[in-house]
Image (spheres, rainbow, N blue to C red):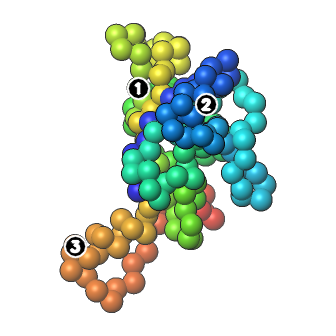
Amino acid sequence: QALEWIPRVPDSRRAAYEEAARRDGLPDFQFTDRNTSGEMVRAATREEYFPVYFVEPYEGNEVAFGYDLASEPARLEAVNRCRDTGKPVATGRITLAQETGTQFGFLIFQPIYRKGAPTDSIENRREVLEGFILGIFRIGDIMKKALQYAGMRNIDSYLYDESAPVREQ
């Protein structure tokens, strides 16, 4: 679906990041969360943010721009695990910020640390984290393409995540 840059932004730098995006041609840019009705709204104040700051392709992913991954527990858990391990981390199934249908997706995070900084301990990795490269995937699209590529037609297929809670498999 997309590739994204997710910087780590302390609250003290939020206004500067939002203003820089506005100067770059996005006049309505702000860090966002989803409210209880599912609408994107200005993100609540937090100690730090992990907003979608670059997305490619932009078309079809506009609504994700500015979305703060720290605002949702499953995404924040993946952010923290990736930061602490220094290894790529995938979420379980989630509804993508840009999803307009009923398809589930998942995210794969790759941490980016300050160049040349030590990353040999959790404490060091936490201190020198710059952000994440993020891959966004739509599960149904992947399955459809895989079956088409294999030349399979008129086959019902099901994919289960056995590591997920029963209601989310």
C-alpha gap between disc 1 and disc 3: 34 Å
Number of numbered discs overlaid on the protein picture: 3
Neighbor class of circle 1 (other Cα within 10 Å; few <14, some 14-19, many 20+) is many
Neighbor class of circle 3 (other Cα within 10 Å; few <14, some 14-19, many 20+) is few
C-alpha gap between disc 2 and disc 1: 21 Å
Of 48 and 162, the residue lying toward us: 48
| Numbered badge on residue 18 | 2
Q: Amino acid at mark 1?
A: Ile
Q: Is residue 18 above or below residue 102?
A: above
**90 relative position to 95: left or right:** left
Of 80 and 4, the residue lying toward us: 4
Q: Is residue 57 visible?
A: yes
Quickly name the residue at label 3: 149
Q: Amino acid at mark 3?
A: Tyr
**Helix, strand or loop status at disc 3:** helix
Q: Is residue 96 visible?
A: no
Neighbor class of circle 2 (other Cα within 10 Å; few <14, some 14-19, many 20+) is some
Which badge, 2 or 1, comes first in the chain's sequence? Answer: 2
Quickly name the residue at label 1: 112
C-alpha gap between disc 2 and disc 3: 42 Å
**Helix, strand or loop status at disc 2:** helix
**Helix, strand or loop status at disc 1:** strand
